[in-house]
Amino acid sequence: MNTTKKETKKVYVIASTEYEANMPDTFLMDEMGNYYGVTHNSYACWHNYPKSIEHWIDAEGSDKGRYFNIDEVELPVEQIEKFDALTREYEQVLDSVPTFEHKYPYRSEYKTKKAYMEAADEHVKKYREYIKANNIVEKNKRISELWTERVQLFCSFSSKVFEAIKDNDPIKHL
């Protein structure tokens, strides 16, 4: 019989309030002001990682009157670490996708329709080469898998916060 108790930690589960079509920002913060699961485009970054939960209680998000949904919970450290690791891996894979530098041709830049169509065909050819050479399909698939797993895990942390964000389209469609 295994009587080993899993280590837990008190954290704040935090999600921004957003328009229904938008994805809420989702992250964790512990009592010491340490953050977990913060993406590059997070309010936590933009607010310079405040150390006190009081900041988030009073903070507004994307619009006036849009506050943060917060719940204080006790979570297994293993889940906190998994959420943070999923977020870091998601960000690493996302950052590894190179930018396609070629701009689609404008019709007005060409004297004839034929010249424009040739330029458009060449652009599509270069884009297909970029996709293949950079393994874009597999990277996008992995990005999607990581994001889905991350958000589903986050939603399991607090029924109170989940209830507040469950009607946002990106949450509903996972």
Image (cartoon, rainbow, N blue to C red):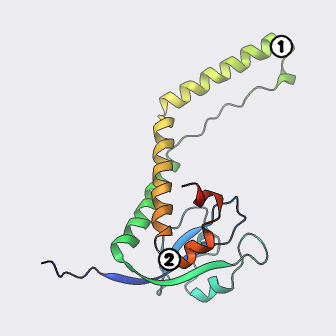
Residue type at numbered disc 1: Lys
Residue 93 visible to the viewer? no
The dot on residue 113 is: 1
Q: Are marks 1 and 2 in contact (CB under 8 Å)?
A: no
Q: Tell me what residue is drawn at x 47 percent, y 79 percent.
A: 34
Left or right placement of residue 130 versus residue 65 in this view: left
Using the image as rendered, state which of residue 21 and residue 53 is in the foreground.
Answer: 21
**Mark 2 Cα within 10 Å, few/some/many (few <14, many 20+)?**
some
Say what secondary structure mark 1 lies in. helix
Q: Residue furthest left?
A: 1
Q: Tell me what residue is drawn at x 30 percent, y 81 percent.
A: 7
Q: Earlier in the sequence, mark 1 or mark 2?
A: 1
In the picture, the quarter occupied by the C terminus is bottom right
Using the image as rendered, state which of residue 24 and residue 118 is in the foreground.
Answer: 24
Residue topped by disc 2: 158
Picture coordinates of residue 57 (x, y %)?
A: 64, 85
Q: Tell me what residue is drawn at x 58 percent, y 60 percent.
A: 171
